Image (cartoon, grey):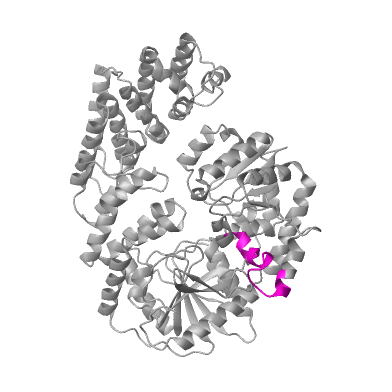
Amino acid sequence: MPEPLKRTLLLPGHPTQPGPVPKPPEFHAAWTGALLRASDPRSMHELVVQLISSPVLEYLQRNHRYLRGLADAWSNALLRAAFQPKQIHYSMEMLALPPLFIRMKWRITRSAEWERRRQTLEGLLHRQPQGSSGFFNALFALAVVEGLLQGTNPAALQLFERIAGVVERAPSVGGLMEKSGWYVDGHRSLPAEVLRLAGQAPGEMRVFAWLDLLGFRRIARRAWMEAVFEGLALPWMLAALEQDDFELALKLENRISLDYVRQREGDAHQQACIARWAQPMHEAGRRFGKRLGPAPDAAVTTPARIGFLLLSQERLGHSEWLLGVVAGLKAMEPISLEPVVYFFDAQPNSLPDDLTQRGCMVRHLVEADAKDSWVARLARFRETLASDGCRACVLVSTDVFLHFVFGMRIAPVQIWWSMKYFSNLIADVDALFSVGTYGETERVLDGRRWRVIPAALLEPAVEGAQEQAVQIRKRWPGKTILGSLNRPEKLDNPEFLDSLARILTENPDSVFLWFGRECSRRIDQELMRRNIRRQCAFEGWVDTRVYSRVLDVHLDSFPWPAGMTGAQVMAAGVPSVCLATPEVLQHGVLSMFWPLWTGQAGSVAMQQAVRATVSDEEGGLLLPCATSVDEYVALASQLIRDVERRRQVGAVGQRLVEKFNRPDESARVFAGHVHEVLDSVGRPAGGGA
């Protein structure tokens, strides 16, 4: 973007206090000229994002008469973008402007050229085969043109009507319309016309086509996601359960969990969601189990075998903890339990290889047939558990399928091992396991007993990790590299983002890295609103074992912290700044030692050992654990500016992990809990231990 235009758009100050405003002729000439010269959708997209997120927007709302030239230039540029199919995606966010013009009561010109373009698109729509990229691009371009011509809901609903009857897979047109303001901001329910068009529980392919069409994705706005969940996704899942369409119900549960439940961190949201379908899902699992008949008896083996079920082969926090426990179990003398790990998907990853290298038996529940259903995998899983001689099944840190699987009585003994949330009401579970600190053996939460397993980080070596980190660091020469190795949902907290803004503003030679599968539009906008986006870089989905070595300082998110990645950072000798919220003390790296340091758990000898590791000469905590947001900012700034302090604190964290993160001890405690459960559960119908 030309520097003069940047100066014109990026005015100083907050939107409510925009500071100096460009003179109308300068503004008009800069913007219309830039839009007319923009040769590709990406350039136009960048220009529009700058406009709608700058204080100039406030100025426009007060000076409507200067909009005509801008509106004409913008609409002509967008029409050009609509006919560049390979780059069409870059023009999506430019849909945000038609509602802006309409709210300002500005009539956009309806020219014969626009009508001709629309007719061209209609013809293209009829010629393109459904499902082709050309078909989807034509649909999107038509949405753009109709939005310009008609404005708000009429165009959106006409497009819904056209798409709903002809496609089985659709682009996220509804999501674009929602983000662009085509529906009233702050809505809590879908328009009645959309509910009418969607119908009641259509077939599986059309259900997911509709969710795609409506933009049911984790990065969408929360109000919109709630509207789609309440209006369609949840009713469809409950209807599928009533009709014993188990396959559709399970797939919907998975989609809802990934995109809606996990959109927000926190026990309250997770519990409120799952409570909506837990009971009917559990009852459906019982009906399915009865259809399969009595579960076959497991063969008796010595040592006793237990099966772990992971839905995915992805390397995430819970799978890394499991790897540590499995390695400890296989190293015990004598071996107390024989673990077998089952994977529900066929996604290639190194986790199965790491397990196999440690002598663990690995089973994949996916057959070569691409049409293999999830229901078929669960039926096969119950048979395989018995034939492998597994007396217990441990469902590892997932609530997806939890109630259905335990309802069908997948194994003689059923255990849920949760590493985050502990408030679910679960039927037919024989024991509840969680992760905690050394010296802690159990917790009582919501009146239920949870057996505690000390955290176990077994970090497999990554070949060339340090060399990769050195090369990555070269992208920010002379900068202090900060980052949060957490999912974007954990960063989505105003207090954390405000503290980040203070840290970056006070330390202009710092850069902040953040990560995730998709760049969260909401967080990106929040960074821009706080004027720190230029100091931030989204790195995508990365190997945390490499990036833990890239950072100079890790800024742990709050109230919800990093889990396994926080331990990785400390193991790499990088200081991690934490805020001691209740969630951090229960789920974060602090939970590994905080109860010992404060004398709430463990033996006196163990407490003294921890204090000797993490305390200074006056008995204060050397690790940067803040008790207020102001202290969090101060600790981070101190570490940024004092390299020697950074090394000292990083070394303390590294010693703590090396000394007290022991897979052998975790495995010993785990095995003791499992044997106690196996001995105490004498009949198939467990009632909760």
Give the residue drawn at x 37%, y 80%.
383
Q: Quadrant of residue 219?
A: top left
Q: Nearer the viewer, residue 509 or 110?
A: 509
Identify the residue shown where x is 31% and y is 70%: 282
Q: Is residue 131 above or below residue 407?
A: above
Q: Classify residue 463 as left or right of residue 240.
A: right
On the image, which quarter does residue 249 sit in? bottom left
Residue 238, image x and y in percent? 25, 61
Question: What quarter of the picture does the C terminus occupy?
Answer: bottom left
Note whether residue 584 is visible.
Answer: yes
Residue numbers of the magenta segment: 588-607
Identify the residue at horizontal 51%, vertical 81% (top origin).
Answer: 674
Please tell me whether residue 551 belongs to the stretch shown in magenta.
Answer: no
Give the percent coordinates (x, y) of residue 368.
Answer: 38, 67
Residue 598: x and y, percent? 67, 64
Task: Using the image as rendered, state which of residue 185 and residue 201 is in the foreground.
Answer: 185
For the view shown, which residue lies furthest in the right direction? 617
Residue 254 in sight here? no
